Structure formats: structure tokens, C-alpha cells
Image: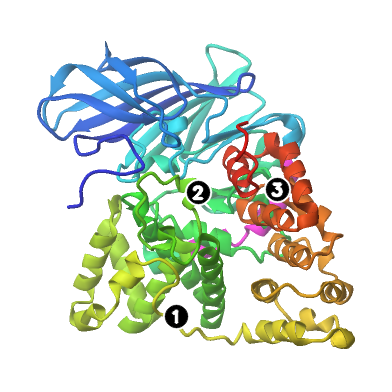
Amino acid sequence: MTSATDPCSFSSFSKCVTKHLNLTFHVDFDSHVLKAKVALTVEVLVDNFTSLTLDTKDLKVSKVTANGQAAKFTLGPKHRFMGTPLEITLPFDLSRGQHVIVEVTYETAPSASALQWLTPEQTAGKKHPYLFSQCQATHCRSMVPCQDTPAMKHTYYAQVSVPKELVAVMSAVRDGEEPDPQDSSRVIYHFRQPVPMPSYLIAIVVGALESREIGPRSRVWSEKEFVDKAAYEFSETETMLKTAEGLAGPYVWGQYDILVLPPSFPYGGMENPCLTFATPTLLAGDRSLSNVIAHEISHSWTGNLVTNKTWEHFWLNEGHTVYLERMIGRSLESEQFRQFKAMGGWKDLQESVNTFGANNPLTNLVPNLNEVDLDEAFSSVPYEKGFALLYHLEELMGGPEVFMGFVKSYIQLFAYSSVTTEEWKHYLFTYFKNKVDILNKVDWNAWMHTPGMPPVKPQYDSTMADACIALCKRWVKTKEGDLGNFIEVDVKTLSTHQLIEFLSLLLQEEPLPLSHVKRMQEVYQLNAFNNAEIRFRWLRLCVKSKWEDAVPMALKMATEQGRMKFTRPLFKEVYNFDKYHEEAVRVFIAHRAAMHPVTANLVAKDLKVDADKST
């Protein structure tokens, strides 16, 4: 058994575990707070149990009771990013095996890092305010006092009071609504999540939401302005769910809905159970970005059902999810498509390693996270280094069918629990007990505990990438006088995925001469593409080549949506163009208040905005 501590949590889970949460939220759009109560059902693991510690962050706690009796509580010192421990002393002693219901009455702060409060102007409809949460990795504690560690899994119920013209949805099964008996202008929505899950998957959205049915167990939710477009974009959801079930086993969460958020949502997607959150940048109109949904669907097994015990083992969530996502792609498209996506992933990994530095311990597959702010550590390393390891093992163990058998068995064995890398590895050796001699030859230390690129580069099938590589080479080698040789049909024969890959390859090269990017626009008309993945890479390429016309377009894309994958590199690219260094900072400061708190904080660091002055 590994030690029962999590460097990212104050709560000590060796003494007690949370089994269930009952949440009561009153959503106050005027003061940007949740007025709240949480009842935690806690199981005691030791004798003479008299106190417990919960994680909180910027919460105003007014009262704590234990089994209905008043309990003493103190808030400890505030940590730079981990928040504040809430120390609760029980008015009685408990023994191992007993349960206690600890109820905390509190209010969130307007600046709670888990929540973004949008004004009506920041929504598509422009009429009503909007609230959404993003708890991963350690922000749940700014919304709910809890044992905020993925080692802990619990069910939850919730009652949410909102203005009656708005709709609330959560990462749970919808369980009816009723008028708020305290206030006739409000309505209470009920939710229940009967499958145990970690705190980082608690999620709430309140807004002028509508939904459309897109399958027998799926609806898509968004503001009405996006809902039909979203229903079209995600119409293949049931096919993907069935494919995933064929690979990984039954889907246990009941409903699988997708919620399209306003543009400031900082991630591509978030795998909240029963309700995947998705960025509106996926609504490209060509269904080409469905790999994000394949990824979030895959998390229903790897991440949500089998969870990393602490964030050091995040690769168990993400590496396996990327592996499963690409196996879905293999089933729905082809093995060559999976190989093509794997090559793109290796390039993303290379970019992360370059950004962090090849000796940076945060590029370890299993990093040490003592005193590390997880938002700053986030990168493609756990995703793509994790996938590369699993793909390498697949090759050693006998191919995709054989290795998928292991992944499915691993999911069944560890379902409803949280695991460490050691436990995963021990099971790998048990499952492949006849191939232990091969597994012993793997350089586990180099894969797990060494920074930089993996020790082995898989030889992926480049069939689908060859056209992208060839076109990239032509642009890099062509002299200015020969630019007339490029014609529109060069890119017309490429799929959306291949066009994205072509631009990604160019971004890895030295910046192209300005004459080249101007010619590229002339023949390929890339400014006209609305697909966010294409536009993002194209604008970065232009700014790298110091095309001044692209600067306002890059800053516009960086601010009209807030997906960090796009916003941070676009701001950095303009910031690194000396002539527009100050413009990047000015635009950021002008838009900062409208940005998600995590995004704003990280862009400020990227642009060194708060380095010399505190804001």
C-alpha cells in the first residue's frame, strides 16, 4: 500500500474517508457567490478519532456541526496556491468503522478559482448571466470544503436554487425541479450521482440553457444560439459510446450529455460524469474535431471509473485515455489514422518538452509535485509520454488487440477505485506473466522518472503524414523566385487533420520568410478557415514570420475565445515579436477581467505582467 498522503491536499485520508456529499447551493448572481451547505458522510478508519482536516480555498465558513451538534473549527494559514486547511474538532470520540455527518455552512468568494461568473455581455444570448465551474485539478476546494484529493471517491446529491429563467445542470443525473419555497422568483434543481467519483469531477453550470436529444442516452446543452449547431457537430456521440463500450466494457454512468460552454472555457473538454464540458471552438461545422469528444468519452473508463490516486500519477488518467481515444479512432476510421494521430501527439510532446526544458522534472512521466502549482505544471506530457509508453508496450506484448485486452482487464479490476503507477505496473506484470522477461528489459526508470523525451521513439506508420511532410519540405526549401510553383490544389487534397498536421510541421521549422507566408495566404486562402485548430496554427506561423497584418488577427483569436491551448501560445507569439511586445500586454490587460481566472493568471505569467507589480 502506498502512503496515504497527497502533496496537493491538506486532508489526511489515512484517518477518515468521505463516502457521500449532500450539497445545497443558492446561486447568487448579484454578489457572485454560492451561499452553500455541504453535509459530508465520513467513515472513520482509526480508533479515538476526534478531528479531521478538509481542504478549502477562499471560503467564508460560518458554522460546522457533527451529527447535528456544534463542532469547533479553525482555518489554518493560507498557502500560496493550495488554499487553507479547515481543522474541525468533533464534540465526541469515534471508533474505527463508525460514520459521522459533518455539515459545513459557508459562502464561496467572488474570486473562487473553480468558478467563472459571466455577465450577460459575455454570453451568446446577451440577456442573462452565466456560471460555470472547472474543478480539475485542485479547485473544488474553492467551491466545496472537502477532502480534495483524487484518492477519495464519493457519491453526491445536490439541490441548486437559481433564478427561474435559468437552468442548472451538474455532473450527475437530473432528478427533477420545483419552485423555491423561500423565493417565488427562483427554482430548485435536484441532482444525484450514484457512482462514486473524486471531488475534481463535481461540476455545475447555470445559464439560459436549452438541450436537444442526440442519442438514446445523450442530449447536447448550450445557449440556444449554439444548440442546433452543437447537435449537428456531436451527432456521432452514440456511435462513439458504443465503440468505446466494445473496447472497454459497459458505460456505467447512465446519461452521457455534452454541454457546450461560452468561449472563455479554458480547456478543449472536461470529462465531468454524465455531462462532458466542451469548448465552442469545436463547432467547426465539419465534424473534424470529434477526437476531443472521443477523448472525453474515453475518460468515462480511464479517469472517472479508474482514477489516479494522486496527481503525480495523472498519466494513468491521460495516457490511457489517449490510448483509448485513438483505439476508437482506429475502429471508426483506420489503423493508419491511429498511427497518424500518434505521430501528431509525439510532436505535441516535443513542443511541451521544449517549452518546459528537457531537464525539467515536470517532464517526468511521474513528477514530484511537492510545492508545485498544478495549473502551472499542466502540459501534454502525461497525455503523450503516457501514450508513447502504452504504445511501446503494445508493440512488445503483441499488438493492439492483445494490449487492449490488458487495458480492459485493468479497468475491470480497478473500477470504482484510485490507483498508483506501482499498482498499475504490478498488474501489468501479473497479466503478462508469460512475458515478464520482455517487461524486465523496459527501461522503467527512463520512462517514469527521467525528464525529457522518452527513451524509445516508436516507429509510426507515416502513410497519412507523408503528404504533409512533403508539402512542408517544399515550403521550407523553395526560394523566393519559385513561389509561383505552389497552387491551390496542394491543400485541396489534404483532409482537415492533414492540413492541421502540415501547419504543425511548419511550426517546428525555422520561421518562413515573410514572402512565403504571404504567398501561402494568396494560394491557400488560410485566413478564410474557421476551424480553430487550423486558424490557431496559421496565425502563429504568420506572427513567427513577422507578418504584421496577422498580429491583430492573432490577438483577436486570443481574446474572443479562452481555450488555453490557443490563447497562451498566441499571446506569447505576439509578445515575442519585439515590435508588438507592448501591444500584447496592453490587449491582455484590457481583456483580463473577462478571462477565466486560471487563464488570466497563466497568461499574466507568460507575459510577465505581474512580475514587477502586484495587481
Q: Amino acid at mark 1?
A: Lys
Mark 1 or mark 2: which comes first in sequence? 2
Q: Which residues are magenta?
A: 224-242
Q: Quadrant of residue 207?
A: top right
**Residue 605 image position (x, y, % from top left):** 59, 45
- Which residue is farthest front? 612
What residue sits 73% from the left and 60% below the top?
285
**Residue 360 image position (x, y, % from top left):** 44, 61
Give SS at disc 1. Answer: loop
**Residue 111 image position (x, y, % from top left):** 56, 28
69 or 476: which is nearer to us?
A: 476
Q: Amino acid at mark 3?
A: Gln
Identify the residue position indicated by label 2 in the image: 376
- Residue 239 on the magenta segment: yes
Q: Please indicate, yes or no, whether residue 321 appears anywhere in the rendered image.
A: no
What residue sits 74% from the left and 65% below the top?
544
Tell me if mark 2 has few (under 14), some (14-19) or many (20+) residues whose alpha carbon lies within 10 angstroms of its own: few
Give SS at disc 2. Answer: helix
Identify the residue position indicated by label 3 in the image: 561
Mark 1 or mark 3: which comes first in sequence? 1
Question: Can you say whether 161 is above or below 464 in the image?
Answer: above
Tell me if mark 1 has few (under 14), some (14-19) or many (20+) residues whose alpha carbon lies within 10 angstroms of its own: few
Chief secondary structure of the magenta span? helix
How many marks the image carries: the answer is 3
Rounded to the nearest angstrom, the CA distance separating label 1 from label 3 is 35 Å
503 vs 266, left or right, is right
Identify the residue position indicated by label 1 in the image: 457
Q: Amino acid at mark 2?
A: Glu
312 vs 468, left or right, is left
- Residue 295 on the magenta segment: no
